[in-house]
Amino acid sequence: MKIIVAIKQVPERDARIRIDAEGTWIDLQDVEFTLNESDAYALEEALQLKEEHGGEVVVLSAGPERVGKTIREALAKGADRAIHVESDDLAAYDALGVARLLAAAVKDEQADLILTGLQSDDLGLGQTGVILAELLGLPHASLILKIEAAEGGVKVLRELEDGWFQHVELPTPAVLTIQSGNSKLRYATLMGIKKAKTKEVRRVTPLELAAEPEASVVVLERVLLPNKQRTTQILGGSPAEAAAALVEKLRFEVRAL
Amino acid sequence: MSELTSGVLVFLEIKNREISRISWEAMAAAHTLAEGHGLSVDVALVSSPGNPIFETIHGKAPRTVYAIDHPLLHEYTADGFAAAYAQLIEQVNPSYVVFPHTYQVRDFAPCLATRFKQVLISDVTGIETHAGAETAPPTFIRQLLQGKLNAHYRHRGTGPCFLSIQAGAFRADAAEAGATTLATFEPRLDAAKIRTKPGEPFRASAQTVDLGSASILVSVGRGIKEEANLPIVQELATALGAELAASRPICDSGWLPMERQVGSSGQTVAPKVYLAIGISGAIQHLVGMKGSQCIVAINKDENAPIFEVADYGIVGDLFDVVPALTAAVLKAKG
């Protein structure tokens, strides 16, 4: 089974949020980056499928040079090679534009499956995988927890709302977007880290992909810190003082104790 | 070919044989948009036109209600829904297409938008219309970085603008009288072009806890760090007579069962008191609990988005605050 895993490098969860000078994104100075959480699960599913059925796992990522570090980490965990769509200017593309780049980068790979996380922890659009399927003319299923090989394709477990699930069968090649949480994520071994250094990373630019640049239809104009929806009373003092103050509130104002 | 003027087309969803609450909220969002731009609102629903559910449509009356009717739509598939919706959009030719932001919409709407060379603006929490609306397009607000940042988006160019509306962001309108036409829309669908085969939905296991009936919930998130630390929140829950709940990562890690998960992929709760402990407050969690009467947040990060919805907050290390709170509760209960 040949599996492509599209991954994204995103700011660490506890990164300090300061708005940049243009007011259109956060100031990335001093920000640490990491692999997007649901993409980490997509990678894990791909590696498990390879262990079970053999084949190849190819990591695909778009972004500036720093993304190379996240790609190496994926290779260290066991992916076989990688494609890095190198661009310092991804913010100029909307979700369709990014998906067009990814589609152009993998269209000749003849993969059986393309996996990606269901949404990114930074922009959270939750669309790249589904758009990619449409651009490549492939069937897809989203919010997938489990993948099994089946006659002519795969059988997947899909999460629905409110604790419901369903199985979906679909023919391969197909695109699946992976929900977090089904498997335990592996760590890279020392041997894996060593091997990753020699694995192939093919770097391509948007220009080389000749993915026709089209004007974005959706533009992120500015970002701002959210307004509070409720007035929060912050209870200060030592932990014991704050706890006592909260109990007072819960007893006499909320009347819940 | 359409004689109709362009407007806003809202796709509603049925859940438990009713039009879902989030669908009404999407319709309210559509009316906000329509009023700002002098547009009309049409509504569409996959159902046979004889379904009594059409009599339950409330809110500001739409102009036309389309009953999208086809045997291949009886069970949801992305291929079937995207094809049917695309045909209706071509016929109606709306300026805006509005969806409730549900798991189903997330599954097919990005595809559908792509067919029109458009990008879905997903998870919209606010719409600002501007004076001189014909020339100034509206601003769509959505959250970034797990709710730590708000972003203003704009649609440009020609072609319909696709939006999905987050739960709880708009208030469903009360019913208003008005003239509405019910029209049947029969899409042309080909069974051979539906590539996925969906199975019957099922619940993973019998529910043994009912978070919905608890008056106090003690909910724990990533801040607890390790499974071994859970007893400190369990002790607080016991002292308060509360049920223990959790954010998604805790259930993903298997530290608490999925049925205790609050948020868009878990339960929606509205207890008298919701204590969020070590929960940063990503939107997926907030939609499941922000209707709580009183929200208490305990978090070491004073900028955590959970404080935006909290009534009371303690900024501090939960490993110091929670035991102190348990002691204070026990003392108060004497």
Image: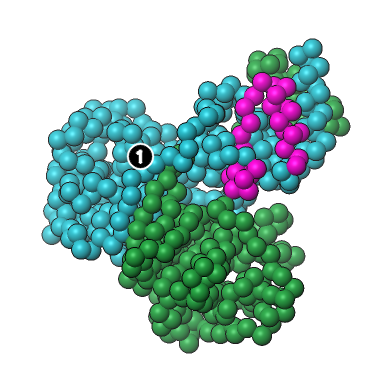
Chain colours: A green, B cyan
Q: Secondary structure at mark 1?
A: helix
Asked if one can make out residue B8 in the rendered structure from this viewpoint, the answer is no
- Decide which of A142, A98 is in the foreground and name it: A142
Tell me the residue that label 1 is attached to: B23
Give, as a single range, the part of the protein colored magenta: B228-255
The amino acid sitting under disc 1 is Ser
Describe residue B276's horizontal placement relative to residue B205 as left or right: right
Q: Position of residue B167 (x, y in %)?
A: 45, 40
Residue in view at x 31 percent, y 59 percent: B196
Q: Is residue A195 above or below residue B325?
A: below
Residue in view at x 64 percent, y 24 percent: B242
Describe residue B150's horizontal placement relative to residue A66 as left or right: left
- Decide which of B220, A31 is in the foreground and name it: B220
Q: Main secondary structure of the magenta part?
A: helix
Residue in view at x 42 percent, y 57 percent: A156
Q: Position of residue B74 (x, y in %)?
A: 23, 46
Q: Position of residue A103 (x, y in %)?
A: 42, 75
- Decide which of B266, B25 is in the foreground and name it: B266
Q: Residue farthest to the bottom?
A: A208
Q: Chain of mark 1?
A: B
Q: Position of residue B191 (x, y in %)?
A: 19, 59
Describe residue B149's horizontal placement relative to residue B142 as left or right: right
Which of the 4 quarters of the picture holds residue B36? top left
